[in-house]
Amino acid sequence: MSLRFSHSSFLLSLLFIFLSSIPAILALQNDDPTIKTMQDFSGYPVDEPTHSSISVSLSVPLSIDNQTLPKQIDELSTFSDAPDPAVTRVLYTDKDVLGRRYIKNLMGLAGLSVREDAVGNIFGRWDGYEPDLPAVATGSHIDAIPYSGKYDGVVGVLGAIEAINALRRSGFKPRRSLEIISFTSEEPTRFGIGCLGSRLLAGDVTLAKALKATVDGQNISFLDAARSAGYAQDQDDLSSVFLKKGTYSAFVELHIEQGPILEEEGVAIGIVTAIAAPASIKVDFEGSGGHAGAVLMPKRNDAGLAAAELALAVERHILESGSLDTVGTVGILELHPGAINSIPRKAHLEIDTRDIDEKRRNTVIEKIHQSANTIAKNRRVNLSEFMIVNQDPPALSGKSIIEAMEVASKELNLTHKLMISRAYHDSLFMARISPMGMIFIPCYKGYSHKPEEYASTEDIANGVKVLALTLAKLSLS
Ligand SMILES: [Zn+2]
């Protein structure tokens, strides 16, 4: 928890703050004693049944271009507002526009037909021989938070283009069309809204409305920013972005794990079975403040202590859930006026809580609310705000997609394990309109959102191969 002082409240009316999180711990091996424990804890099946899956016959075995893909990752990282190896690529900035151009160009070179929607989600399509069937989609994002790395999101976009190229080289012909999506603003950096593009694709009416009045930290409106990047030209109504449920028969995202488990265990591929969903809450306490020397203890109603007590209550309620899958963080705690000799008059907390079980997470939120009320009463402070900013439902991966990813890993002789994604991704929102699955690859020490983020060429190639074979299977199904 960081303790900091700020007069200014955040400018954004919509805040979906995504805190990075600690990824998954599900084990696959039957003799692993943790399996039982994890199943008991999470209530989530560790062993998914595997049925026979469609076999893909390729005239040439799948091969990944290990020269070109790492080069492309490096090239894309040069479109950055931070010096190498750090990457800063924020929505609708000049560097973001250059990055987008780079992706569209590669999609074109891969023979895909490219289109963009009103907020700049980029689509590259390879038509199948039954093009009227719902397509199989894959993709991720290329925006990067300030001073982050080269791989988060990028592996799932450039990797997808390479997966298509690899399938073409091996003589594969898709039945369902294959479509790559580069999502707009997965990171909440500029407008405080993460997964902006995929939320809209999934038909988020509230967001489409709210964006008309959303501004960034410089008071630039979302629509003006979008227009400066060449989008939303003659429309304020962003509902054109919405996709119908059933547009895709499947969506698969390739991503670095952003946690240490695959690397530590020496496993090549993580198959995501569920994505935990965050809820974020903003809380304000108000007391009377006063001089740190003059006001005696019995006379005080200290908003700072109320906040401190609530932070501990958050931890208690999380632990009471009895599940390792329930997590909670008080990532922001601001005191006002923030002077050493002044009793805090106002305290502002922001709480992030996540679970793969929506009901259990919502019970925690209810308990936090009750505690906030009790603490306010006992400490004679005013609970002036308790706002649930967002409360997204978690998503389970589609069974048939898990199966396709497992069979693909086996056929490629790659070790794999089932795991939960505790960070959330565009896949969480794509799950609202399509069965979804995610492929994780190891990354160095689990580092992400910092310049040290790294995934090896071999690990990336493994992930791209599994993605390619999974897409091929899903395309034929
Ligand atoms: Zn990402």
Image (tube, grey):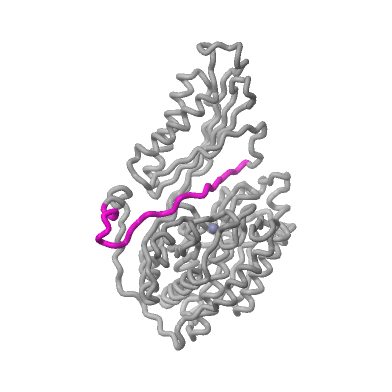
Can I make out residue 441 in this image?
yes
Q: Quadrant of residue 396?
A: bottom left
Q: Is residue 466 above or below residue 264?
A: below
> What residue is rendered at 52% in x and 55% in y?
447
> What residue is rendered at 54% in x and 55% in y?
448
Can I make out residue 135 in this image?
no
> What residue is rendered at 29% in x and 62% in y?
29
Name the spot of residue 272 as percent of width and height, x first. Answer: 41, 60
> What residue is rendered at 39% in x and 39% in y?
318
Nearer-the-camera pick, 30 or 381: 30
Ligand 1 is found in which quarter of the picture?
bottom right
The rendered magenta stretch, by its main secondary structure, is classed as: loop
Nearer-the-camera pick, 128 or 271: 271
422 within the magenta span: no
Q: Is residue 430 above or below residue 335?
A: below
- Return the residue found at the far bottom: 59
Name the spot of residue 339 as percent of width and height, x first. Answer: 64, 24
On screen, residue 53 versus residue 373, left or right, reads left
On screen, residue 241 versus residue 323, left or right, reads right
On screen, residue 127 versus residue 191, left or right, reads left
Name the spot of residue 17 as percent of width and height, x first. Answer: 55, 45
32 within the magenta span: yes
Q: Quadrant of residue 6?
A: top right
Q: Is residue 271 above or below residue 367?
A: below
Q: What is the tally of numbered marks visible in this picture?
A: 0
Magenta-colored span: 13-36
On screen, residue 420 versus residue 202, left or right, reads left
